[in-house]
Image (cartoon, grey):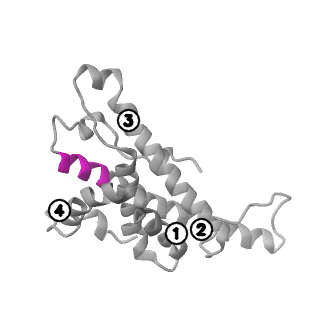
Amino acid sequence: MKTRFLRGKCHALYFDCDMNSFQTVILNIYENLLCCAARFHCHLVVQTKITHILSEKFVRGKGSLFHFPLVTFSPNLCCIHFQSDTIFSLLQYNYKLIRSRGLSQNAVSNGCKISLTEEQVIWLGCHAFFVVLKRKQSRYKGVLVELQRVSQGSQYTPARNLLAPIVSSFLHAPVPSAVHPCKMKY
């Protein structure tokens, strides 16, 4: 699965610790990952509808010689691993994208300083995907278990201890705009 459509806005200015507070940098990344999680869900819903329509058409004998792989929301092990692997590949890609933007010639010449670890970005991403996909628990039960297992792992304890209060205050803060990313209907 190509992840280019899932990446969010990634300008070094959003992640510069000299220009923004640490809390603002974390929230910028978290909001970006919330949007990625929502797009991930929407993409899978559309893909499932398309494969369902195609499978109905080709199963009834109206199709051609081509066979389309069926990717559905069934809780089989293959589908859970595919979705989990896609999410974790996306999180690693986002970390590398953030680092590369911070090391770009333009960012370096302007003095941008990005001081985030891969564990912090992956923990934020696991939490963001968990928040979005939790709204559709029946579809993502196995994926939610995997996201929770990874984010609660000992490797991410320092990131969790540092970032959980920031994310929690964001999720429970009053929303000034009409649409909050966590309260969107998918």
Which amino acid type is marked by label 4?
Answer: Ser
Which quadrant would the C terminus be assigned to in this image? bottom left
Instruction: Give the residue at mark 2.
Output: 80
Q: Which residue is mark 1?
A: 143
For mark 4, give the secondary structure.
Answer: loop
- Read off the residue under disc 4: 177
Q: Which three-letter amino acid code belongs to the residue tagged 2? A: Ile
Give the residue at x 73% y 73%.
56
Q: Is residue 159 above or below residue 71?
A: above
Q: Residues within 10 Å of mark 2 (few under 14, many from 20)?
A: many
**Mark 3 or mark 1, which is nearer the start of the sequence?**
3
Residue at 43% over, 46% down: 7
- Observer-nearest of 36 and 88: 88
**CB contact under 8 Å: marks 3 and 2:** no
Q: CA distance from mark 3 to mark 4?
A: 30 Å
Q: Quadrant of residue 129?
A: bottom left
